[in-house]
Image (spheres, grey):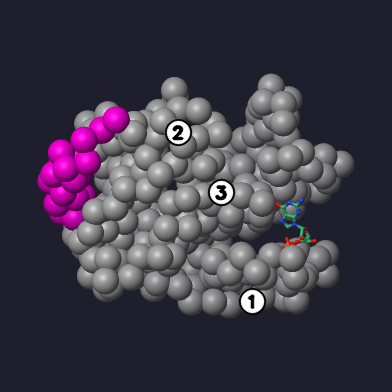
Amino acid sequence: MLDNDLEKIPKLTPTLGVEYKNYKVLGLDATTWDMGGQSRYRMKYLTEFQKYFEGTSVLFYVIDFQAEDLYGDALDYLKKIITALKKFYSNGVFIPILFHKYDPHVYAKKEEVEQKSSALKERVEKVIGTIPHAYYMTSMYEPYSVFKAFSEGLLHQVTGGELIFQKIGTIATELGSPAAILLTMGGYIYGAWHSKDVQLMDLVKFSRTVLDFSHLISEKLKTAFNVLPLTEMLDIAAITFSNGSDLIAYCIMVPKAKDNTKLQEELSKKQEEMQKVLELIGKA
Ligand SMILES: Nc1nc2c(ncn2[C@@H]2O[C@H](COP(=O)(O)OP(=O)(O)OP(=O)(O)O)[C@@H](O)[C@H]2O)c(=O)[nH]1
Ligand SMILES: [Mg+2]
């Protein structure tokens, strides 16, 4: 899924052993190890722990949110990993925890989900202790949710990464926008922010449209300003610019009534601020 290849989704097959891939994120090189979860492999990762975990900076732990009867197993295994991590590597690992298969069509009732996820979080907290971690609700039917978890997980490791998160939100607030996403032309999400008042449906549509748009960004669109229709009331304003070898888009949700010329002016100014923060990243 992380290859941004949505056509692959129906053909997902169990991962045999470990699959390695290289990525470039914010100009930095990252290698992902996709570790098959079948029990024969799970044993092996523990008995040959150092071989598999040495040098790990981010460990994405995926729990099947729909399989309540397997939560116990998932937590037991997490506990074993945490114990070994503490023994061999006392610091530096960040663990995004994905509550996966959080499918939009299955979880219609908000209260039910919140209850279930907070109960599960409590159980995770007991296991994970003081190791830095974050929670994500993800589903393959909402690719954005998976990309966001992955991108943020990696960005967390980058010096200055949190400055970007802050900037995405403050700029949106200053422009009176309820939601913003910063991402690359390949669809890697550097970060996203939204106000508490934003409608969930609008947010879903916003993230989908922005993700589609990111695949259309090309050299030709460099430092361009675009307005895309979102709903009857809302548009998306997007400004694209280059950062090193990456092409990046900063997209915000705006009311249709906004004067586009003014918006473009304001966004261009903010883009320079954002670029300064991006330039600091990874250089400290
Ligand atoms: N409903 C639902 N099914 C999913 C989702 N993600 C994956 N699946 C399905 O779950 C099954 C397993 O998916 P995989 O991606 O192979 O799972 P995995 O955790 O990588 O499995 P291993 O490689 O064996 O560790 C497949 O049939 C997928 O279609 C999701 O978000 N929602
Ligand atoms: Mg797999």
Of 88 and 122, nearer the camera is: 122
Q: Residue at x 27, y 45 (%)?
A: 163
Of 160 and 196, nearer the camera is: 196
Q: Earlier in the sequence, mark 3 or mark 1?
A: 1
Amino acid found under the numbered disc labelled 3 = Ser
Span shown in magenta: 257-277
For label 2, the crowd category at 10 Å Cα-Cα, with few meaning under 14, some 14 to 19 and many 20 or more, is few
- Ligand 1 location (quadrant): bottom right
> How many numbered discs sit on the rendered protein?
3
Q: Which mark is residue 145?
A: 3
Q: Which mark is residue 232?
A: 2
Q: Is residue 271 magenta?
A: yes
> Which callout, 3 or 2, points to the residue nearer the camera?
2
Q: Quadrant of the C terminus?
A: bottom left
Residue 189 % position (x, y): 42, 55
Amino acid found under the numbered disc labelled 2 = Glu
CA distance separating discs 2 and 1: 44 Å
Q: Quadrant of the N terminus?
A: bottom right
Q: Which residue carries the number 1 mark?
A: 19
Q: Residue at x 51, y 65 (%)?
A: 56
CA distance separating discs 3 and 1: 22 Å
Q: Earlier in the sequence, mark 3 or mark 2?
A: 3
Q: Residue at x 37, y 48 (%)?
A: 228
Residue 278 seen in the figure: no
Q: Main secondary structure of the magenta part?
A: helix
Q: Is mark 2 within 8 Å of ligand 1?
A: no
Residue 6 % position (x, y): 61, 65
Q: Is mark 1 within 8 Å of ligand 2?
A: yes
For label 3, the crowd category at 10 Å Cα-Cα, with few meaning under 14, some 14 to 19 and many 20 or more, is many
Amino acid found under the numbered disc labelled 1 = Glu
